[in-house]
Amino acid sequence: MMKHPTREEQRNLVRQWDTTGRELEALRRNTLRGMAYSWADVDALLAIGDLGDRPSRSTSGLVEMQHWFMKAAPPEKLEMIRKQMQLNRVSVC
């Protein structure tokens, strides 16, 4: 049987994840700053982008992302979200 952590243990875990995440981000940033700049690497990354055979986007994709979030929302939450959006006079997908 799995032991569920207490509220205090949960808070400590969240604090630990937050601290660790910030430290890892700083480490990643410092590692990237210390790397030598390579035009060959830049060209390779740009070439990967050119390989995609997709039409260019004219939008940021936020509307499409909201659409997918709405589709993935649990039904009970979805109804609450729709009511809230209607109260705020926001268009609903």
Image: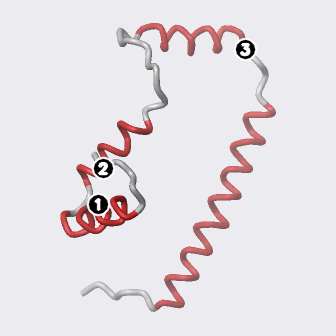
Camera-side residue of 76 and 22: 76
Pointer 2: what residue?
Answer: 92
Query: Which badge, 3 or 1, comes first in the chain's sequence?
Result: 3
Neighbor class of circle 2 (other Cα within 10 Å; few <14, some 14-19, many 20+) is few
Q: Nearer the viewer, mark 3 or mark 2?
A: 2
Number of other residues with Cα within 10 Å of mark 1, as a class: few under 14, some 14 to 19, many 20 or more: some
User: What residue sits 78% from the left and 42% below the top?
Assistant: 30
Tag 3: amino acid: Ser
**In percent of the image, x 39 and y 38: which residue is there?**
63
Q: Callout 3: few (<14), some (14-19), or many (20+) C-alpha neighbours within 10 Å? A: few
- Of 85 and 47, the residue lying toward us: 85
Quadrant in which the N terminus is drawn: bottom left
Disc 1 from disc 2: Cα separation: 7 Å
Q: Nearer the viewer, mark 3 or mark 1?
A: 1
Sequence order check, earlier mark of 3 and 2: 3
Disc number placed over residue 82 in the picture, else none: 1
Element class at badge 1: helix
